Image (tube, rainbow, N blue to C red):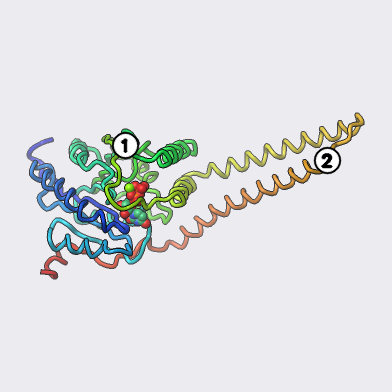
């Protein structure tokens, strides 16, 4: 790092959904990081934290306002309703882009190690536009969370979606990377699959994931499965090819079965029972429904994309200007 280069203004973007138990803790910890890094001259003095309230139903927004009044380095963005983690994060990043030179996104539960933010900044100063935070182990996750997450990354790889293994949405992005990311206007958001497409110089920093200090996971199984399916179907049409492959196999199988029946007829063996017949009809019926459903999912996605609706609505921003109004 050259000393003469003016340090960039860092924005730490934190999506929050019903995080009243975590907010004050997160704010304090992240303010500590800002103070430390600014003290070392690695980031600008006016660096800040941007909490994004994703339509929380608890006191999250009131707490963000309170933090903002107490600490000028805390800013807030209130979305008009709950749009989900990926959209809330995008709203935060695109808002922060205009106010900062570099951003780091992190979850409000601080399961990711905030101490590696310094390493991320170092790599940014060495010329990386994107720095991924990667978990070196998952010891603290429950067995269930660990195995499902592992299966998720494997499945993504098999389906040909490029993601960074064991990286969630804890990452640094330069202003330039965000500028390019903002050109991706799609409604089916899967940031982990999209950011690698930018193609800029990237690096990784490793950390051990901690347990959630307070509050509970907002990613139950249902949401996780839909994230996985969304991730795959937004980036890959392989499932449709697999269905075609399955169709070809079943047709080939039925031709063989027909040949067998014909041979049995001529050799005098009677084809036994109707169970097998009924079962195969059900099986093929099931495969057909599944295939139609899968294709329907893709068509549904096309429908959502062509409408080109706005991805989120901002209700309020607490920034410097707001500060003047408040005080
Ligand atoms: N989150 C959000 N909107 C939602 C669900 C979650 O902004 O609809 C935020 C949440 O507050 C947290 C982050 O996304 O900061 C990740 O959620 P969580 O920690 O519950 O997920 P996990 O770490 O268990 O996968
Ligand atoms: Mg979490």
Q: What element carries label 2?
A: loop
Is residue 89 visible in the rendered image? The answer is: no
Q: Which residue is drawn at 7% across and 44% down?
A: 39
Q: Is mark 1 on a helix, strand or loop?
A: strand
User: 10 Å neighbourhood of mark 1: few (<14), some, or many (≥20)?
Assistant: many
Is residue 257 visible in the rendered image? The answer is: yes
Label 1 vs label 2: CA separation? 56 Å
Which of the two discs, 1 and 2, labels the residue nearer the N terminus?
A: 1
Q: In this view, does 314 lie to the left or right of 309?
A: left
Q: Residue furthest top?
A: 267
- What residue would you read off at disc 2? 273
- What residue would you read off at disc 1? 135
Q: Is residue 181 left or right of residue 144?
A: left
Q: In this view, does 282 lie to the left or right of 242?
A: right
Relative to the observer, which residue lies in front, 252 or 141? 141
Quadrant of the image containing the C terminus: bottom left
Q: Which residue is drawn at 50% across and 56% down?
A: 302
Relative to the observer, which residue lies in front, 3 or 71? 71
Residue 271: image location, x then y, percent: 85, 36
Residue 157: image location, x then y, percent: 45, 36
Residue 13, disc: none
């Amino acid at each position: 790092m050259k000393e003469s280069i003016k340090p960039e203004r860092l924005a730490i973007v934190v999506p929050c959904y019903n995080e009243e138990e975590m907010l004050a803790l997160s704010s304090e910890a992240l303010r500590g990081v800002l103070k430390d890094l600014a003290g070392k001259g690695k980031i600008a003095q006016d660096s800040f934290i941007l909490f994004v309230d994703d339509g929380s139903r608890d006191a999250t927004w009131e707490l963000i306002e309170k933090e903002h009044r107490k600490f000028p380095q805390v800013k807030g963005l209130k979305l008009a309703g709950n749009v989900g983690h990926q959209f809330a994060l995008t709203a935060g990043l695109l808002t922060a882009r205009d106010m900062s030179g570099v951003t780091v996104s992190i979850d409000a539960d601080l399961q990711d190690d905030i101490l590696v933010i310094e390493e991320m900044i170092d790599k940014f100063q060495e010329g990386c536009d994107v720095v991924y935070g990667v978990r070196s182990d998952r010891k603290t996750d429950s067995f269930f969370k660990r195995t499902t997450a592992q299966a998720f990354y494997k499945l993504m790889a098999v389906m040909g979606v490029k993601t960074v293994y064991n990286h969630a949405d804890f990452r640094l992005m330069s202003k330039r990377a965000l500028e390019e990311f903002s050109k991706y206007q799609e409604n089916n958001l899967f940031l982990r699959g999209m950011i690698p497409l930018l193609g800029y110089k990237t690096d990784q920093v490793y950390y051990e994931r901690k347990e959630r200090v307070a509050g509970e996971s907002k990613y139950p199984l249902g949401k996780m499965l839909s994230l996985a399916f969304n991730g795959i179907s937004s980036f890959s049409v392989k499932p449709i090819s697999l269905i075609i492959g399955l169709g070809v196999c079943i047709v080939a199988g039925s031709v063989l079965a027909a040949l067998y029946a014909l041979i049995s007829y001529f050799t005098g063996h009677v084809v036994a029972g109707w169970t097998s017949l009924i079962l195969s009809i059900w099986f093929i019926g099931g495969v057909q429904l599944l295939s139609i459903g899968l294709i329907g999912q893709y068509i549904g996605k096309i429908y959502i994309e062509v409408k080109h609706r706005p991805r989120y609505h901002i209700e309020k921003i607490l920034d410097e200007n707001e500060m003047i109004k408040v005080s």
